[in-house]
């Protein structure tokens, strides 16, 4: 029986590459998205992967959305917490909304998605929880006090939950991508983006597929001894 994978923010950018890679690896995949109906429709038409709309920032919406995915595809074996947003601003200009929006999606969203799935994974004695954090959760980034805090929180969440899941056959891992060629990074002012690329030893932005391959590995049976790990994929920009 094919395993079921659910990817949040799975219709664009890194998430879309993850959803496609998991499908190609034999999983039944569901892709969640929050807002961009046009991109989601295009993704569904091109890939045949079903899409489901809800905000990961809303716990009740997550519980209802997960129930729908499980009714359609079966119990979720692999959760990829990929959905993320930026609301970049220097801290002296940062608003409460910019702080709370980023916390709501990038940190609370990981709780909201993992919590409703956790009991089922424990009961079935198998699960994979893979969260997409960021290089900026590791090193901090000016203009991103909100984002860096949330992404660092994702790493702590992973280390704690891995210890709880280990005896139940659930691995919990986090991937820290560096700067990847997606809309999010392209939204950074060009001058700043060029200075960032100059700091990447491999000399280029990453591709979404660079991260998708990490997810496929961590989801596999071959990765069953790896839990609580932080996998960095950043072209050498920041070495932990
Ligand atoms: N690296 C180096 N310098 C930076 C910088 C960065 N990431 N961000 C800002 N600066 C510098 C600017 O070049 C500028 O320097 P000068 O005064 O010498 O020109 C100074 O800081 C102030 O910046 P701005 O003039 O742009 O100030 P602003 O208030 O108009 O905008 C900002 C501030 C919104 C933070 C904007 O600079 C910005 O968007 N910076 C990029 C922040 C960033 O790196 N975000 C990452 C997004 S991608 C992502 O998050 C994905 C991931 O996980 C890696």
Image (tube, grey):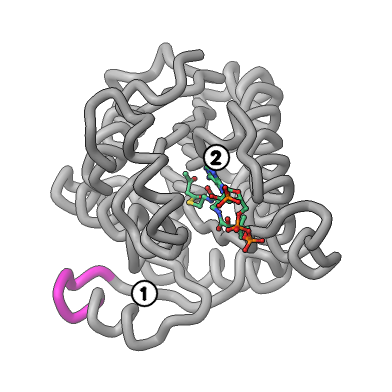
The residue that disc 1 covers is 51
The residue that disc 2 covers is 121
Was residue 2 drawn as part of the magenta stretch in this picture? no
Q: Position of residue 205 (x, y in %)?
A: 28, 42
Towards the viewer: 120 or 138: 138
In this view, 62 is above or below 41: above
| Marks 2 and 1, the one that precedes in the sequence | 1
Q: Residue at x 45, y 32 (%)?
A: 175
Towards the viewer: 57 or 188: 188
Q: Is residue 194 visible?
A: yes
Kindly state the secondary structure of the residue where label 1 is placed.
strand
Around disc 1, counting alpha carbons within 10 Å, would you say few (fewer than 14), some (14 to 19), or many (20 or more)? many
Q: Which residues are magenta?
A: 44-49
Kindly state the secondary structure of the residue where label 2 is placed.
helix
Residue 228: image quadrant is top right
Majority secondary structure in the magenta region? helix
Q: Is residue 135 left or right of residue 12?
A: right
- Residue at the extreme bottom: 38
Mark 2 sits near ligand 1, with its Cβ under 8 Å away: no
Towards the viewer: 137 or 197: 197
């Amino acid at each position: 029986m094919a395993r079921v994978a659910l990817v949040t923010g799975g219709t664009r950018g890194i998430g879309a590459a993850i959803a496609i890679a998991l499908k190609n690896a034999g999983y039944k995949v569901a892709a969640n998205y929050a807002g961009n109906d046009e991109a989601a429709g295009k993704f569904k038409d091109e890939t045949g992967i079903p899409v489901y709309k809800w905000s990961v920032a809303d716990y009740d919406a997550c519980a209802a959305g997960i129930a729908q995915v499980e009714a359609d595809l079966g119990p979720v074996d692999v959760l990829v917490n990929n959905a993320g947003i930026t609301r970049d601003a220097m801290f002296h200009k940062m608003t409460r909304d910019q702080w709370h929006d980023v916390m709501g999606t990038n940190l609370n969203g990981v709780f909201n998605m993992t919590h409703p799935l956790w009991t089922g994974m424990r009961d079935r004695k198998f699960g994979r929880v893979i969260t997409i954090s960021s290089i900026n959760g590791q090193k901090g980034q000016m203009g991103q006090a909100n984002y860096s805090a949330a992404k660092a929180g994702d790493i702590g969440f992973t280390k704690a939950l891995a210890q709880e899941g280990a005896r139940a056959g659930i691995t919990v891992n986090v991937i820290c991508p560096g700067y990847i060629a997606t809309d999010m990074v392209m939204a950074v002012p060009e001058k700043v983006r060029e200075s960032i690329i100059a700091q990447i030893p491999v000399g280029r932005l990453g591709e979404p597929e660079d991260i998708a391959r990490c997810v496929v590995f961590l989801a596999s049976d071959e990765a069953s001894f790896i839990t609580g790990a932080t996998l960095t994929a950043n072209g050498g920009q920041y070495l932990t």
